[in-house]
Image: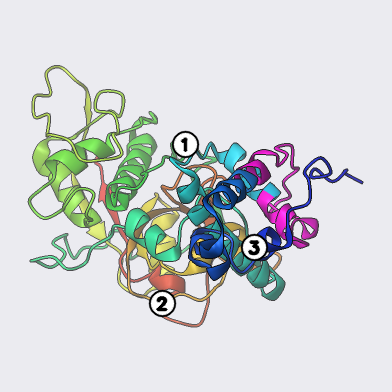
Amino acid sequence: MRPHLYNSIPSPSPIFTHIFSSSTVGTDILKTPQYMALSSYSKISLLAFCVSLFVCCGLAHEFSIVGYSPEDLTCLDKIIELFESWMSKHGKIYKSMEEKLQRFEVFKDNLKHIDQRNKEITSYWLGLNEFADLSHEEFKTQYLGFKTEFPRSRGSSREFSYGEVVDVPVSIDWRKKGAVTPVKNQGSCGSCWAFSTVAAVEGINQIVTGNLTSLSEQELIDCDRSFNNGCNGGLMDYAFQFIISNGGLRKEEDYPYLMGEGSCEETKEEKEVVTISGYQDVPQNDEQSLLKALAHQPLSIAIEASGRDFQFYSGGVFNGHCGTELDHGVTAVGYGSSKGSDYIIVKNSWGPKWGEKGYIRMKRKNGKPEGICGIYKMASYPVKKK
């Protein structure tokens, strides 16, 4: 059994114990009557104790698949130790002790949600990922960015080139076929629409040419401004149209990602670009049509990702609660089945530490035409002539 890490720390006085109880950890400490009644010297001592309690926590915690173990939840000391270990794993550094205490309060609340949900769900699980110190409102503000409120309707051809397809494979995974670049990270910029667009273009370009080339999301964020809005959201169809009218999209290495908005670099010089010849929409709320298209290439899709379980998804086939108010652009890169559960393989843009190395498997056949989280409501794909 691992030895307790606090044996060398003197026991705090009763008033310290009361103030630093699980119900008052964080900024609430500074608001308690007990704290206000302390002398200046005692206040300094209390803060010093808080600092030592955080600093003395061990950093060698062994993370389970969900990032914590039942032992971590047994007392406040263990939760603090878990927080320190989580900070070390994800490289978290806070500007002040006050900010650290605030983030600890959020972390503790998220941990409670994760543990409770893991006791209730069976087909997927949640974990302490890098978003565990963000409130759900903060997370939604920073990491979603799909916008449907635009001044014109979707403008692609009404043609659906895969409509006459009869037979589709039982499963397909475009990652295994070399048509998917490594998972990228949009950061706290609402540019998911650009990542969804780029992943679909990277896919069809590899399928047609045999070359897997990582392309520039930043060029879309900076230069596609007629209808899309950089870090404040956009729509994949408009991005496809921009790539066509722009004469192609540059490589990521020639126009790297900034995790923010920059000035449009219009001069392409002699840089290589990847082109598409058009784009098409998948018929709305039609799972079979989506599978027909997905059997031939990766697709840009939109989902509602604002549910709290989505923030902490760590693995399994997701069938959790979510609506159909689309707010996040992602890319479908395959489909399959596991233990009798059919799913769509979705590439996200929240980095490889989220989900299943950056991916999520979302349940098919949930009994609703629009699919889970509205996954069948607004899918489209680029066209590239050979």
Query: Where is residue 158 drawn, in percent x and y?
Result: 18, 65
Q: Earlier in the sequence, mark 1 or mark 3?
A: 3
Question: Would you say 203 lies left or right of 254 here?
Answer: right
On-image quarter of the C terminus: top left
Q: Secondary structure at mark 2?
A: loop
* Residue 125 badge: 3
| Mark toward the start of the polypeptide (2 vs 3) | 3
Q: Residue 171: horizontal and vertical position, in percent?
A: 56, 56
Report if the CB atoms under discs 1 and 2 are less than 8 Å apart: no
Question: Where does label 2 land, which residue?
Answer: 323
Q: CA distance from mark 1 to mark 3?
A: 23 Å
Few, some or many residues within 10 Å of mark 2 (<14, 14–19, 20+): some
Using a 10 Å C-alpha cutoff, classify the residue at mark 1 as few (fewer than 14 neighbours), some (14 to 19) or many (20 or more).
few
Is disc 1 placed on a helix, strand or loop?
A: loop
Residue with the mark numbered 1? 182
Which mark's residue is nearer the viewer, 1 or 2?
2
Q: CA distance from mark 2 to mark 3?
A: 19 Å
The amino acid sitting under disc 2 is Gly
C-alpha distance separating marks 1 and 2: 29 Å
- Amino acid at pointer 1: Pro
The residue positioned 25% from the left and 42% from the top of the image is 384
Residue at the spot 74% in from the left edge and 50% down from the top edge: 64
Q: Quadrant of residue 179?
A: top left
Q: Which mark is residue 191?
A: none
SS of the residue at dot 3?
A: strand
Write the start and end of the magenta stretch as one range.
51-80
- Among the two numbered marks 1 and 2 on one chain, the one whose residue lies closer to the N terminus: 1
